[in-house]
Image: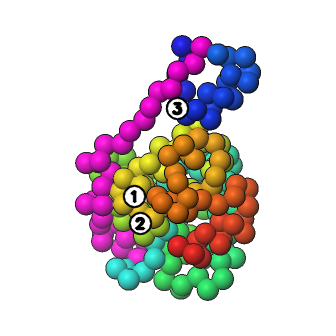
Amino acid sequence: RVLVPSRFFERVLNGHGIHHTALWTRGVDTATFSPAHRSAAWRARFGVGPDDMLVTYIGRLAREKDLKRLLEAWVDLPNRPANAKLVLVGQGPLESEIRGREREGVHLGGLLTGQALSEAYASADLFVFPSTTETFGNSLLEAMASGRPCLTVRAGGIPEFARDGANALMVAPHDTAAIGGGLARL
Protein backbone atom coordinates (compact mmCIF):
# COMPACT_ATOMS: atom_id res chain seq x y z
CA ARG A 1 0.00 0.00 0.00
CA VAL A 2 0.98 3.59 -0.60
CA LEU A 3 -0.12 5.53 2.46
CA VAL A 4 -1.52 9.00 1.76
CA PRO A 5 -2.32 11.83 4.18
CA SER A 6 -5.53 12.96 2.48
CA ARG A 7 -8.26 11.76 0.13
CA PHE A 8 -7.34 14.64 -2.19
CA PHE A 9 -3.86 13.23 -2.81
CA GLU A 10 -5.20 9.71 -2.94
CA ARG A 11 -7.27 10.86 -5.94
CA VAL A 12 -4.17 12.48 -7.45
CA LEU A 13 -2.24 9.21 -7.18
CA ASN A 14 -5.22 7.21 -8.48
CA GLY A 15 -5.27 9.55 -11.48
CA HIS A 16 -1.66 8.55 -12.18
CA GLY A 17 -2.56 4.87 -12.10
CA ILE A 18 -1.52 4.18 -8.51
CA HIS A 19 -4.48 2.40 -6.94
CA HIS A 20 -2.97 0.45 -4.03
CA THR A 21 -3.45 3.38 -1.63
CA ALA A 22 -4.77 3.78 1.89
CA LEU A 23 -5.42 6.80 4.09
CA TRP A 24 -2.94 7.42 6.90
CA THR A 25 -4.82 9.70 9.27
CA ARG A 26 -3.19 12.42 11.31
CA GLY A 27 -3.61 13.85 14.76
CA VAL A 28 -2.11 16.45 17.05
CA ASP A 29 -0.92 16.11 20.64
CA THR A 30 -3.18 18.63 22.36
CA ALA A 31 -0.84 18.85 25.35
CA THR A 32 1.96 20.02 23.04
CA PHE A 33 -0.26 22.27 20.92
CA SER A 34 -2.52 24.15 23.31
CA PRO A 35 -3.52 27.72 24.16
CA ALA A 36 -1.87 27.08 27.56
CA HIS A 37 1.55 27.70 25.96
CA ARG A 38 0.87 31.40 25.21
CA SER A 39 3.97 33.38 26.17
CA ALA A 40 4.41 37.11 26.72
CA ALA A 41 8.17 36.54 26.42
CA TRP A 42 7.75 35.02 22.94
CA ARG A 43 5.69 38.01 21.83
CA ALA A 44 8.14 40.50 23.38
CA ARG A 45 10.95 38.94 21.34
CA PHE A 46 9.41 40.69 18.31
CA GLY A 47 8.30 43.86 20.08
CA VAL A 48 4.71 42.65 20.42
CA GLY A 49 2.89 43.71 23.56
CA PRO A 50 -0.31 42.28 25.05
CA ASP A 51 -2.52 44.66 23.03
CA ASP A 52 -0.58 44.31 19.76
CA MET A 53 -1.47 42.01 16.85
CA LEU A 54 0.84 39.06 16.12
CA VAL A 55 0.21 37.21 12.87
CA THR A 56 2.24 34.01 12.49
CA TYR A 57 3.12 31.57 9.71
CA ILE A 58 4.89 28.35 10.66
CA GLY A 59 6.35 26.10 7.99
CA ARG A 60 9.04 25.78 5.42
CA LEU A 61 10.24 29.07 3.93
CA ALA A 62 9.96 28.00 0.30
CA ARG A 63 8.30 29.22 -2.90
CA GLU A 64 5.72 26.44 -2.94
CA LYS A 65 4.30 27.79 0.34
CA ASP A 66 3.16 30.95 -1.52
CA LEU A 67 4.88 33.24 0.98
CA LYS A 68 5.48 35.84 -1.72
CA ARG A 69 1.72 36.45 -1.90
CA LEU A 70 1.47 36.58 1.89
CA LEU A 71 4.26 39.16 2.08
CA GLU A 72 2.72 41.24 -0.73
CA ALA A 73 -0.67 41.11 1.01
CA TRP A 74 0.95 42.17 4.29
CA VAL A 75 2.77 45.15 2.76
CA ASP A 76 -0.35 46.28 0.87
CA LEU A 77 -2.76 45.68 3.74
CA PRO A 78 -4.86 48.84 4.10
CA ASN A 79 -5.29 50.16 7.62
CA ARG A 80 -2.84 47.65 9.06
CA PRO A 81 -2.36 48.65 12.70
CA ALA A 82 1.08 50.12 13.36
CA ASN A 83 1.52 47.63 16.20
CA ALA A 84 0.85 44.57 13.98
CA LYS A 85 3.71 42.17 13.31
CA LEU A 86 4.07 39.19 10.98
CA VAL A 87 6.46 36.47 12.14
CA LEU A 88 7.52 33.70 9.77
CA VAL A 89 8.73 30.68 11.72
CA GLY A 90 10.81 28.05 9.94
CA GLN A 91 13.71 27.87 7.55
CA GLY A 92 14.23 27.16 3.90
CA PRO A 93 15.55 28.52 0.62
CA LEU A 94 13.62 31.83 0.85
CA GLU A 95 15.06 32.74 4.24
CA SER A 96 17.95 34.88 2.98
CA GLU A 97 15.74 36.58 0.37
CA ILE A 98 13.14 37.47 3.01
CA ARG A 99 15.84 38.65 5.39
CA GLY A 100 17.43 40.77 2.64
CA ARG A 101 14.20 42.60 1.77
CA GLU A 102 13.23 44.35 4.96
CA ARG A 103 9.50 44.83 5.20
CA GLU A 104 7.84 46.84 7.90
CA GLY A 105 6.56 44.63 10.69
CA VAL A 106 7.95 41.37 9.23
CA HIS A 107 10.27 39.17 11.30
CA LEU A 108 11.86 35.75 10.96
CA GLY A 109 11.48 33.46 13.95
CA GLY A 110 13.88 30.72 12.85
CA LEU A 111 13.42 26.96 13.03
CA LEU A 112 11.75 25.93 16.28
CA THR A 113 11.04 22.65 18.03
CA GLY A 114 9.65 21.54 21.38
CA GLN A 115 8.41 24.13 23.85
CA ALA A 116 9.52 27.07 21.67
CA LEU A 117 7.35 25.79 18.81
CA SER A 118 4.39 25.32 21.14
CA GLU A 119 4.83 28.91 22.35
CA ALA A 120 5.09 30.27 18.80
CA TYR A 121 1.71 28.80 17.89
CA ALA A 122 -0.09 29.73 21.09
CA SER A 123 1.35 33.25 21.24
CA ALA A 124 -0.03 34.29 17.86
CA ASP A 125 -3.25 36.24 17.56
CA LEU A 126 -3.81 34.89 14.06
CA PHE A 127 -2.24 32.02 12.13
CA VAL A 128 -1.94 32.39 8.36
CA PHE A 129 -1.20 29.53 5.97
CA PRO A 130 -1.15 30.47 2.24
CA SER A 131 0.33 27.21 0.90
CA THR A 132 -1.48 25.60 -2.01
CA THR A 133 0.68 22.48 -2.15
CA GLU A 134 -0.14 20.78 1.13
CA THR A 135 -0.82 17.09 1.08
CA PHE A 136 -2.40 17.56 4.51
CA GLY A 137 -1.31 20.71 6.39
CA ASN A 138 -0.03 19.61 9.80
CA SER A 139 0.95 23.12 10.84
CA LEU A 140 -2.61 24.34 10.26
CA LEU A 141 -3.93 21.54 12.48
CA GLU A 142 -1.34 22.45 15.16
CA ALA A 143 -2.44 26.11 15.03
CA MET A 144 -6.07 25.06 15.41
CA ALA A 145 -5.19 22.90 18.43
CA SER A 146 -3.37 25.93 19.86
CA GLY A 147 -6.64 27.86 19.74
CA ARG A 148 -5.61 30.32 17.04
CA PRO A 149 -7.96 31.82 14.44
CA CYS A 150 -6.67 30.55 11.10
CA LEU A 151 -6.55 32.00 7.60
CA THR A 152 -5.81 29.46 4.89
CA VAL A 153 -6.39 28.80 1.22
CA ARG A 154 -8.86 26.31 -0.20
CA ALA A 155 -6.37 23.92 -1.82
CA GLY A 156 -4.68 20.55 -1.52
CA GLY A 157 -5.57 18.39 1.45
CA ILE A 158 -6.51 21.31 3.71
CA PRO A 159 -10.26 21.35 2.92
CA GLU A 160 -10.55 17.84 4.37
CA PHE A 161 -10.40 19.27 7.90
CA ALA A 162 -10.61 23.06 7.54
CA ARG A 163 -14.16 24.37 7.35
CA ASP A 164 -14.70 27.91 6.13
CA GLY A 165 -16.42 29.98 8.79
CA ALA A 166 -16.28 27.17 11.35
CA ASN A 167 -12.64 26.50 12.24
CA ALA A 168 -10.89 28.65 9.60
CA LEU A 169 -11.37 31.46 7.17
CA MET A 170 -10.63 30.01 3.75
CA VAL A 171 -9.78 32.11 0.71
CA ALA A 172 -9.06 31.41 -2.95
CA PRO A 173 -5.60 30.00 -3.69
CA HIS A 174 -2.96 32.02 -5.56
CA ASP A 175 -4.82 35.26 -4.80
CA THR A 176 -2.90 38.04 -3.05
CA ALA A 177 -6.00 40.22 -2.72
CA ALA A 178 -7.94 37.35 -1.12
CA ILE A 179 -5.16 36.79 1.42
CA GLY A 180 -5.11 40.51 2.17
CA GLY A 181 -8.89 40.57 2.50
CA GLY A 182 -8.75 37.62 4.90
CA LEU A 183 -6.05 39.29 6.99
CA ALA A 184 -8.08 42.49 7.16
CA ARG A 185 -11.23 40.62 8.12
CA LEU A 186 -9.61 38.58 10.89
Residue ID for mark 3: 5
Residue ID for mark 1: 121
Describe residue 130's horizontal placement relative to residue 144 as left or right.
right
- Mark-to-mark CA distance, 3 and 2: 26 Å
Q: Is residue 56 visible?
A: no
Q: Where residue 25 sits in the image (x, y, percent)?
A: 44, 31
Which residue is more in the foreground, 53 or 22? 22
| Residue 27 is one of the magenta-drawn residues | yes
- First along the sequence among labels 3 and 2: 3
- Please report the residue visible at 54 percent of the width from the left and 84 percent of the height from the top: 81
Q: Where residue 82 sits in the image (x, y, percent)?
A: 53, 85
Q: Amino acid at mark 3?
A: Pro
Describe residue 47's horizontal placement relative to residue 12 as left or right.
left
Describe residue 94's horizontal placement relative to residue 162 as left or right.
right
- First along the sequence among labels 1 and 3: 3
Q: Secondary structure at mark 3?
A: loop
- Mark-to-mark CA distance, 2 and 1: 6 Å
